[in-house]
Image (cartoon, rainbow, N blue to C red):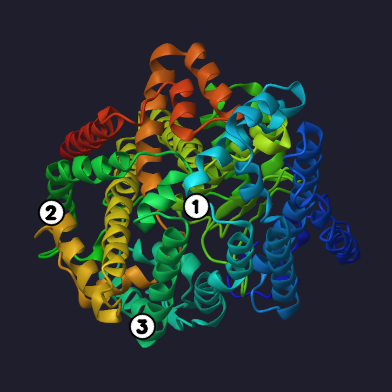
Amino acid sequence: MVHQPDALRKEVPQSDCWNLSPMFQTTEAWESLFQDLEKKIPTYDDFKGTLAQGPERLLACIEFDHGVGRDMDRLYTYAHLKNDEDKTQSDNEALFQRASNLYTRIGEASSFMSPEIQAIPSDQLKIFLDKDAFKPYRFYLEQMIRYIPHTKDAATEQLLAMASESLGAPQRIFSQLDNADLNFGTVKRPSGDVSALTHGNFITFLGHKDRNFRKTVFDQYYQTYHDHRHTIAATLSASVKKDLFWARARNFDAARKSALFGDNVPEDVYDNLIINVKKAFSPLYHYLDFRKQALGVDALHMYDTYVQLVPDVDFHMDYEQAVETCIEALAPLGRDYCNTLEQGLLKGWVDKYENKGKRSGAYSSGCYDSNPYILLNYDSDSINSLFTLIHEAGHSMHTYLANKSQPYPTHGYTIFVAEVASTLNEALLARHLLEKHTAAPKMKAYILNREIDNIRGTFFRQTMFAEFEHIIHGLAGENQPLTIDTFTSVYKDLLSVYFGDKMVIDDALTLECLRIPHFYSSFYVYKYATGLAAALGLVQRITDKGQPAVDDYLNFLKLGGSMFPIDELRVAGVDMASNTPVQAAASYFESRISELETLWQSM
């Protein structure tokens, strides 16, 4: 069956959609829980001013708040998944807005808790923490104690909570514009077929062997961003200033310090990532030269960096075949892991294909009381879709194992560790495919090329994104204007540094900074690069040590959010506070390039 990217949502077969009914059988059931939660909001007033009276009172308030939070998570998860199915449907948007609004109101009502708990004398609070009844909430409370210097009085905390929904507007506006309103038109393929150009097929089309077609796609796609550049720049500027507002409101002297504080990640980790990645430019530049020569072009452009170097290898893999391949690749992680994942991928976890109005890209999302759902825009003609599937499957299995192993207060892991689980799966898939095609040099070179490009995109490109974020937040902190010219100028300078003279920096490419949704979740992207470095180290550890290393890794997945992320990764067997994992990832990248070159010469 051919899946049309511009199909209406109602035309998509149910078998290709995720099954959200385990959360709510009907919209009426969602509405019922919504109303129940609204009625519980005044109960917070009963606890206000009483939390220092004794451990029983404090525990009752925490248990009530976590009960409300658990139900709110389920409401919000359902609403945002429904909204992402089709952003042209106002009913879905209304559901999501109502959930967001309720989330804000609950935040307002509960905002007294942190300052009131933090006002309890530390010796008294330590006595509370030693009681068995507080065991599930110990790490939660310890984290709250860390925030004492960054917490305001109760009245100010309530104001900040009230502001949260409005301050989330830049992200929502960009998401609506990018996913619902931007129209990239249609393109005529070399075959003569006319297709809609979308977020979902943009990278696939850039992988086409016809260079003129690639250039047309690239120019047409970025022309749309050029036409909206001032609006998007204003939205991004507002988002950066929102980050700065939150940092200053929390007594941080910079937005980055505020963003990293929650994970207890030293700023040195961020800085050392950029420093060590820049030290690895030599193999990157070497690879770009190799790519230019292999393609036989006089000058390399960005639209030349996605096309496969190996000719006459047509990739096609239906979704069901992709699932089978993923399960084979993940066999080292054990039968239980693979059986659970296979059932989920085939029976209700995944929304598989692109449709009109559907959110672009891919993600894994769920809550404590739901399946770990996966949004895909799967393309059977793209090997990237296969890797995206196994990437999101890593997130989902992390969620599944954390939810099964942890109580609600500590089930939620941070993004810093999340990208390890997903990237490790990708690394296992690459190794599996290379072993599977040992006797087929062309296919092996094809897979090696793809892995190299993935590392280039994750390790180098995401680090460049991270440096861009750091620079523009620094400019905002110095009260410098953030205009379209500011963004494109900073971005062009970084492109020149990260690509040197090995690639032509087209004017259109400077607009790339306007299309990255992760910039609206500040200081997120660096975690892709650190996650890749950690994952490559863990794959090597699993290869070298076998089952003991697998056990350490699965125990790490089960930790959820019960420890700070760097401490959790030490349980898995890698120390991200050191430079070693990043340097090892750079060496691995270089070794893969050498392997491809050697194979290329023998073909």
CA gap between label 3 and label 1 equals 29 Å
Q: Nearer the viewer, mark 3 or mark 2?
A: 3
Residue drawn at the location 69% of the way across and 62% of the way down: 108
Density class for disc 3 (Cα within 10 Å; few <14, some 14-19, many ≥20) is: many
What residue is pinned by disc 1?
Answer: 385
The N terminus sits in image quarter: bottom right
CA gap between label 3 and label 2 equals 34 Å
CA gap between label 1 and label 2 equals 27 Å
Marks counted in the figure total: 3
Out of 349 and 451, give the one closest to the viewer: 349
Q: Amino acid at mark 3?
A: Arg
Q: Amino acid at mark 2?
A: Gln
Q: Eyeballing the image, is 293 above or below 565? A: below
Give x and y (percent) for residue 523.
Answer: 39, 54
Density class for disc 1 (Cα within 10 Å; few <14, some 14-19, many ≥20) is: many
Give x and y (percent) for residue 35.
Answer: 88, 64
Give x and y (percent) for residue 253.
Answer: 34, 56
Q: Amino acid at mark 1?
A: Ser
Out of 567 and 366, give the one closest to the viewer: 567
Say which quarter of the image contains residue 28. bottom right
Residue drawn at the location 56% of the way across and 57% of the way down: 378
What residue is pinned by disc 2?
Answer: 293
What residue is pinned by disc 3?
Answer: 229
